[in-house]
Amino acid sequence: MIVLLPPSETKRDGGDQGSTLDWSRLSFPALTEHRRIVATRLTQLTSDPEAARRALGLSVKQQFEVERNRTFECAPVMPALERYTGVLFDGLDAPSMNPAERSFAHKTLVVHSALFGPVRAGDQIPAYRLSHNSRLPKLTLKSHWRESVTDALASVEGLQLDLRSEAYAQLGAASPNSIYLRVVNEGPDGKRVALSHFNKKSKGLFSRALINAGIEHSTVESLMAWARGAGFRLERGAPGELDLVVPNADS
């Protein structure tokens, strides 16, 4: 089983002293050429800082993100699980994981990066700034990544639980063995509404519970049975989807 996560715009600084990005050690090595192409276009963009800020949707105060992109290939690295910050990754709370939980997370969690494509949680990556809708010179991320990422994920056996946003899911489809998870709120009339901001928090907490349990689910039925026992309301939704039902928007 793997759990597909979206990345975060925000990244933690720093990394292991003396370390740098090693392309050959990233998971899904079939994506190396595609990764290098994106990296080249991203660093080319930094030659014009103003154009780079526009392409990346950054403010003047975020100029440091352009410098990050200029130097990311020689910057220190850390595991992807620790690199990303934000609401979802706060819910995962990587710093509090014990060695067994961290090992299971590194094997199970896959973060879909706009720069690197899918990477496992233990893959060592630098800080960077690139989003699914960023505009790179002579390259459209959706068309660049879609086929190669789809092929890479299809090569992974077993159940795939897709927690990505729809925007990142468009950069490459999960395998036919995947199921998409939506976080929804159910009103008094029984109508379900997908949540926006709070969906990230719920996905983070749900993923952390999966890591704590350390169970390699092979079927959706197994996952749903575990969820009931773990206090989550996980139910069949639309075809190919599961609904994680939370009681209200403050959950």
Image (tube, rainbow, N blue to C red):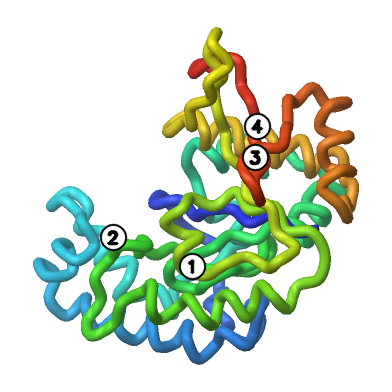
How many residues crowd mark 1 within 10 Å: few (<14), some (14–19), many (20+)? many
**Distance (Cα) linking label 3 and label 4:** 16 Å
Q: Which of marks 3 and 4 is in front?
A: 4
Label 2 vs 1, first from the N-terminus: 2
Q: Position of residue 206 (x, y in %)?
A: 69, 35
Residue 212 lies left or right of residue 13; in this view the side is right
Of callouts 3 and 4, the N-terminal one? 3
Q: What residue type is labelled 3?
A: Leu
Marks 1, 3: nearer the viewer? 3
Mark 1 lies on residue: 126
The residue tagged with tag 2: helix, strand or loop?
helix
Task: Name the side, left or right, on which 233 lies relative to 246.
Answer: right
Is mark 1 in CB contact (under 8 Å) with mark 3? no
Q: Mark 2 points at which residue?
A: 65
Nearest to N terminus: mark 1 or mark 4: 1
Q: Kindly identify the amino acid type of the residue bearing the numbered disc 2.
A: Glu
Report whether residue 193 is seen. Answer: yes
Q: Earlier in the sequence, mark 1 or mark 3?
A: 3
Measured in 3D between alpha carbons, the distance from the residue under mark 2 to the one under mark 1, in whole angstroms, is 12 Å
Location of mark 4 (residue): 244
